């Protein structure tokens, strides 16, 4: 075995042992808000901690709304500064504490956690991340601590056993359902809520809606929305989860050929979204690297459908009730991140090597793939177009081409 391969294997099993050691799935204080005299009088306000990544933070917005509606709970959100805008206008959120990277290192982090613990003394903490950093916060916390069933051990066993161990446990609850289970003792039955009840929820402001209306105006879309407007998001945090650039280009060409207007979004190579030149009226617009997080949400609310890979914007689209057509390769349904909207579709290929990693990069997957990333490469633009056309009942104006 090559040294580099041995190192990767050793690191993987070290992570597995760490996950075993850290494995905890029981809330520290299983009390109800309606508790009698023999139980603590818990506050109906909770500090919820989920620091990253964008998709995981976005998925929290659905459970927050249901906890608020079913149990009257309100929340202070603790997350990274970049993701704080996700909670703008959320009825369950009274405050968002956005943390800078330098605040989450060494002495600064410890000082921050002590200050937060003192400020929220007696207020429950919901650790919805379950990483060493948030576990350190819980050690400082001066109140009840609730944790969610992260299924870290089950996911790793499923991965290293090539899918033979843990499937049923993982499919029993997706990530929003696992979040909801954290406070099941406070809001009874929350752990059994339907996945569609827990879809993300975002609330564009009137100003953001007006901005998005003006942004897509060059496409000259009919006001009655008799034509589809397709959003394309070609990027992902891990390169192995991205559909090849040449496939995106060809898919855009197929949309142009059928006269279907579309726009590009996300952060990455802006050249990918360059429109076809020579048209009197554009059929595509390029917003790559040009929008804030809130503007992206408002744009996705304008779209008839979003085509993307396993990415954060997939959950943003769900949160504004825009149907999603998602392309999955190295990751899988068992991880809990499939889109859960009623009209959402997923394209994935039944390859024996899937899944090859927990997050779509590193460990067993890396950037070197023995199958040349067949899980994404073999999804053709025509396959995606056929699936898109099959959504004609849920995407306004979409019809099959004879």
Image (tube, grey):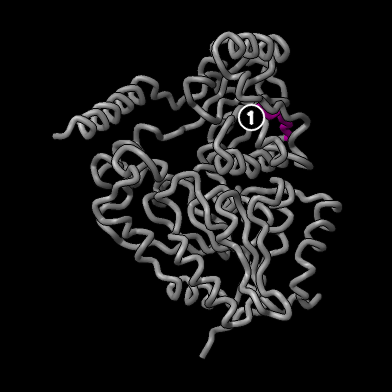
Percent position (x, y) of residue 266?
61, 52
Q: How many marks?
A: 1
Q: Residue at x 45, y 71 (%)?
A: 381
Quarter of the image with the N terminus is top left
Percent position (x, y) of residue 359?
42, 42
Percent position (x, y) of residue 189?
57, 40
- The magenta-colored residue range is 72-80
In this orientation, does residue 37 appear?
no
Q: Residue at x 46, y 32 (%)?
A: 149
Q: Which residue bears the numbered disc 1?
A: 79
Q: Is residue 350 magenta?
A: no
Q: Is residue 369 above or below residue 26?
A: below
Which image quadrant is residue 380 in?
bottom left
Q: Main secondary structure of the magenta part?
A: strand
In this orientation, does residue 367 appear?
yes
Percent position (x, y) of residue 333?
41, 52
Q: Is residue 226 above or below residue 60?
A: below
Q: Is residue 48 left or right of residue 346?
A: right
Q: Is residue 75 magenta?
A: yes
Q: Residue at x 63, y 48 (%)?
A: 200
């Amino acid at each position: 075995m090559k040294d580099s391969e041995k190192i990767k294997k050793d690191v993987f099993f070290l992570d597995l042992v760490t996950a075993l050691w850290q494995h905890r799935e029981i809330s520290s204080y299983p009390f109800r808000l309606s508790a009698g005299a023999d139980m603590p009088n818990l506050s109906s306000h909770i500090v919820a901690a989920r620091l990253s990544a964008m998709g995981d933070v976005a998925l929290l917005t659905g459970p927050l709304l249901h906890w608020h509606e079913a149990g009257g709970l309100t929340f202070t959100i603790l997350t990274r500064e970049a993701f704080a805008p996700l909670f703008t206008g959320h009825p369950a959120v009274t405050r968002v504490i956005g943390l800078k990277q330098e605040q989450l290192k060494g002495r600064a982090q410890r000082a921050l956690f002590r200050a937060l613990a003192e400020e929220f003394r007696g207020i429950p903490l919901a650790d919805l991340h379950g990483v060493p950093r948030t576990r350190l916060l819980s050690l400082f916390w001066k109140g009840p601590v609730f944790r969610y069933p992260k299924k870290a051990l089950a996911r790793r066993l499923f991965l290293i056993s090539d899918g033979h161990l843990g499937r049923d446990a993982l499919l029993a609850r997706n990530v929003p359902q696992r979040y909801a289970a954290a406070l099941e003792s406070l809001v009874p039955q929350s752990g059994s809520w339907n996945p569609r009840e827990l879809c993300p929820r975002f609330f564009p402001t009137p100003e953001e809606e007006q901005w998005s209306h003006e942004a897509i105006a060059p496409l000259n879309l009919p006001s009655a929305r008799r034509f589809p407007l397709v959003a394309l998001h070609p990027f992902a945090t891990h390169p192995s989860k991205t559909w090849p650039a040449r496939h995106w280009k060809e898919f855009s060409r197929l949309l142009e050929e059928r006269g279907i207007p579309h726009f590009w979004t996300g952060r990455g190579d802006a050249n990918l979204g360059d429109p076809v030149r020579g048209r009197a009226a554009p059929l595509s617009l390029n917003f790559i690297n040009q929008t804030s997080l809130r503007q992206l949400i408002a744009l996705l609310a304008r779209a008839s459908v979003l085509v993307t890979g396993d990415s954060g914007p997939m959950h943003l689209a769900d949160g504004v009730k825009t149907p999603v057509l998602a392309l999955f390769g190295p990751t899988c349904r068992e991880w809990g991140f499939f889109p859960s909207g009623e009209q959402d579709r997923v394209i994935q290929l039944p390859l024996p090597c899937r899944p090859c990693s927990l997050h779509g990069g590193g460990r067993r997957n890396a950037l070197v793939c023995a199958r040349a990333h067949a899980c994404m490469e073999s999804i053709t633009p025509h396959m995606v177009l056929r699936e898109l056309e099959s959504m004609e009942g849920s995407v306004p104006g979409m019809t099959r081409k004879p």
